[in-house]
Image (cartoon, rainbow, N blue to C red):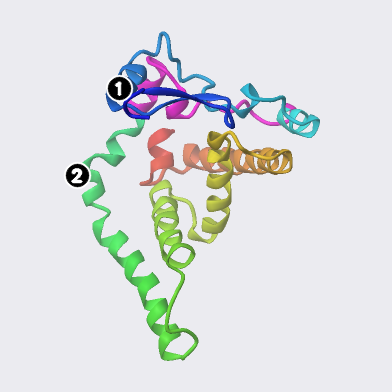
Amino acid sequence: MHQEGFYFDEHLQMFICANYTLMREIMRNTAVFSNVESQEVSRMRAPPPEVVEITKSSLREYEILVASDPPKHKRVRKMLDPPFRPRAIDGWRDQILEIINNEIDKFDAASELKVASEFEAVSEFAVPVPITVIADILGIDRKHSATIKAWSDASVEPLGMMISDERWIERAQLTRKFQNFMIKEFTDRQTEPRDDLLTHMV
């Protein structure tokens, strides 16, 4: 794969680039290799009728950063950069450590109660820690963490281009719920600004 650089995957019906130098050229040449709609599963097959109907009552989905080209990509990236610069992230250090320690304390408590002497690392640690951090940075109540995870999974699932029709319908429903939730959050920040990422975006 590395020697050839490119090959066509029959299963995915896509060209795969497995060469770092060529990939850098592709990523930089958006005039030929545009990112716009590059992550849309609808380019591979038509969406189910239910998805089309749900989409009609939803907002048009904004291109995520990996699916946008300059100058839009640069404008959105510039807007989102400040809260994620090293100095800003360093200000979150203590709070992130507290979140991590709280999750570890749960394992200790379970062990002391003889409930469990081991844990499932992904679902019980690797997922809740970043989701809680993201909720805090956005300024969203932690009680919505599980919902944020479901919305996050739904938003990136089409990137794999292997989504089933059933999941596609479910994703469309989740996307609409996410939009309605975020509209309220942004509206709240317009009237009552806070020290969070959503206020920064507003």
Which range of residues does the magenta coloring cover?
56-78
Q: Nearer the viewer, residue 168 or 192?
A: 168
Quarter of the image with the N terminus in it? top left
Examine the rendered structure and indicate whether residue 147 appears above or below residue 162: below
Residue 124, given in percent of the width and then of the height, sits at 46, 67
Question: Which of the 4 quarters of the picture holds residue 70?
Answer: top left
Q: Which residue is mark 2?
A: 87
Residue at 21% across, 43% down: 86
Q: Which residue is mark 1?
A: 24
Q: Nearer the viewer, residue 67 or 83?
A: 67
- Nearer the observer: mark 2 or 1; the answer is 1
Examine the rendered structure and indicate whether residue 198 appears above or below residue 76: below
Q: Nearer the viewer, residue 195 or 12?
A: 12
Examine the rendered structure and indicate whether residue 197 appears above or below residue 11: below
C-alpha gap between disc 2 and disc 1: 29 Å
Going by the numbered disc 1, the residue's amino acid type is Arg
